[in-house]
């Protein structure tokens, strides 16, 4: 082996880390010397530290615009936040009109139309604007909820359609120059939330003030009484078990709702009305199954010249034009998921779940008026229905509220007939937006 031969690298022994290969050096050509690169001058450290530990000076960026925008950090300039200029922030819409609080208890309140929703970044102002088409009439809705103070203030306006006229008989002369129907609602309430383990409690005292420019015929005075102002006091309490993503209803839960309604300036026309309802949730036989029981009582006796509409729902399959002076209601629902298709049609539709429900409804009313055929039934009368529902839970047009639609069919034993109806509801407290409630 000559002195000019290069030996191959020695392979490391098994289990031994390989040595770092040194950089290859090129032998100089005889008679020439490579140019030596001058070393940078090292400034001695005043503190006596080794020179290799001295950090280089940080050079400031050039004063000109030679640095491109891509290399500069994008940091927004801080500025004052003006609350008045940022009160409205539209974020969602619905391809129909719906009062988001009413559809929780009465899905039949959904109407054709449009709903726009807005909420500012501080979540202190929530506003809605809607258009409703119902029974050949056009209605405009506007609502504002202010949470910047204590308590919460909620104001709503509904304008459109013909002015409501209440008379004893069709022979009564209508009022002169009837106008457009106008309704004003003001709600003052506060929601107090508590948490204990896996349960969440909510206590809500509330006061509702409602005005309507309707005309009511007074037969004994031979004139119309214009306008009515209604006051309602409410106490609401709920104790709900935290729900999982696939839960249709809470596994455990208790809801108590008490209300008292009166018309202090129209006591000759209306008596006071008391309302009480309890909802109990229980787990079913299998996971994600649930049993819910609802019991309610409503009383506005002794009735005077006019009645309030009942807040308690009548059994499924019956006409909602029934109004009773006293009403007792009971219902039982057993709800179960059937399967999860998990199908999506782009951004238009997402089908989440198919579920079924077995239900039983019972009501007992006293002194019942049917405003559809203007009939009256004195004394008590029982109503009952039993059947099933087949519902699909889906999201439409990326709207964050879960929509449920399907059919319900059942049998009414007191009427000895069957019924088949469509069913529709919107769940706003069990979906993406309401997951933390």
Image (tube, helix red, strand yellow):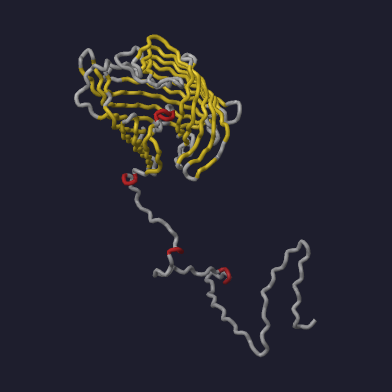
Q: Residue furthest top?
A: 379
Q: Residue furthest left?
A: 176
Please name the residue shown 48% across and 23% down the image: 279
Q: Of 241 and 349, which appears nearest the observer? A: 349
Please name the residue shown 46% across and 33% down the image: 427
Please name the residue shown 35% across and 17% down the image: 373
Could you tell me if residue 148 is visible in this image? no
Residue 346 appears left or right of 99: right
Q: Of 130 and 67, which appears nearest the observer? A: 130
21 over 162 or under it: above or below:
below
Q: Picture coordinates of residue 331 (x, y %)?
A: 49, 20
Residue 141 appears left or right of 46: left
Q: Residue furthest bottom?
A: 31
Q: Picture coordinates of residue 169 (x, y %)?
A: 27, 16
Q: Quadrant of the N terminus?
A: bottom right
Please name the residue shown 37% across and 9% down the image: 378
Could you tell me if residue 355 is visible in this image? yes
Residue 186 appears left or right of 283: left
The part of the image, by quadrant, that contains residue 216 is: top left
286 over 298 or under it: above or below:
below
Q: Picture coordinates of residue 353 (x, y %)?
A: 54, 35
Q: Residue furthest right?
A: 1
């Amino acid at each position: 082996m000559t002195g000019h031969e290069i030996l191959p690298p020695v392979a490391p022994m098994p289990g031994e880390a390989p040595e770092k290969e040194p950089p290859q050096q090129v032998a100089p050509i005889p008679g020439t010397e490579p140019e030596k690169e001058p070393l940078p001058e090292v400034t001695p450290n005043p503190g006596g530290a080794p020179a290799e530990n001295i950090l280089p000076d940080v050079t400031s960026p050039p004063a000109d615009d030679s640095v491109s925008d891509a290399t500069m950090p994008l940091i927004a300039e801080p500025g004052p936040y003006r609350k008045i200029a940022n009160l409205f922030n539209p974020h969602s819409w619905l391809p129909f009109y719906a009062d988001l609080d009413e559809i929780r208890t009465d899905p039949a309140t959904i109407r054709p139309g449009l709903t726009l929703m807005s909420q500012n970044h501080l979540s202190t102002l929530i506003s809605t604007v809607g258009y409703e088409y119902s029974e050949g009439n056009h209605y405009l809705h506007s609502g504002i909820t202010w949470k910047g103070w204590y308590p919460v203030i909620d104001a709503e306006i509904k304008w459109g359609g013909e002015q409501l006229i209440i008379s004893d008989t069709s022979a009564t002369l209508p009022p002169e120059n009837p106008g457009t129907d106008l309704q004003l609602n003001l709600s003052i309430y506060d929601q107090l939330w508590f948490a204990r383990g896996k349960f969440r409690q909510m206590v809500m005292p509330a006061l509702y003030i409602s005005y309507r420019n309707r005309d009511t015929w007074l037969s004994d005075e031979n004139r119309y009484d214009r306008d009515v102002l209604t006051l309602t006091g409410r106490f609401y309490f709920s104790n709900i078990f935290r729900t999982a993503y696939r839960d249709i209803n809470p596994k455990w839960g208790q809801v108590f709702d008490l209300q008292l309604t009166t018309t202090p300036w129209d006591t000759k026309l209306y008596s006071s009305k008391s309302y009480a309802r309890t909802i109990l949730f229980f787990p079913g036989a299998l996971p994600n199954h649930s049993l819910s029981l609802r019991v309610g009582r409503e009383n506005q006796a002794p009735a005077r010249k006019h009645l309030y509409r009942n807040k308690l729902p009548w059994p499924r399959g019956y006409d909602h034009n029934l109004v009773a002076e006293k009403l007792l209601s009971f219902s039982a629902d057993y709800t179960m998921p059937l399967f999860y298709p998990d199908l999506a049609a782009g951004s238009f539709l997402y089908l989440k779940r198919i579920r079924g429900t077995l239900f039983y409804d019972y009501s007992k009313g006293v002194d019942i008026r049917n405003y559809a055929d203007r009939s009256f039934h004195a004394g008590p009368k029982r109503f009952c229905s039993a059947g099933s529902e087949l519902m699909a839970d889906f999201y439409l047009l990326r709207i964050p509220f879960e929509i449920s639609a399907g059919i319900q069919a059942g049998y009414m034993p007191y009427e000895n007939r069957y019924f088949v109806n469509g069913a529709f509801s919107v769940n706003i407290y069990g979906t993406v937006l309401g997951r933390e409630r």
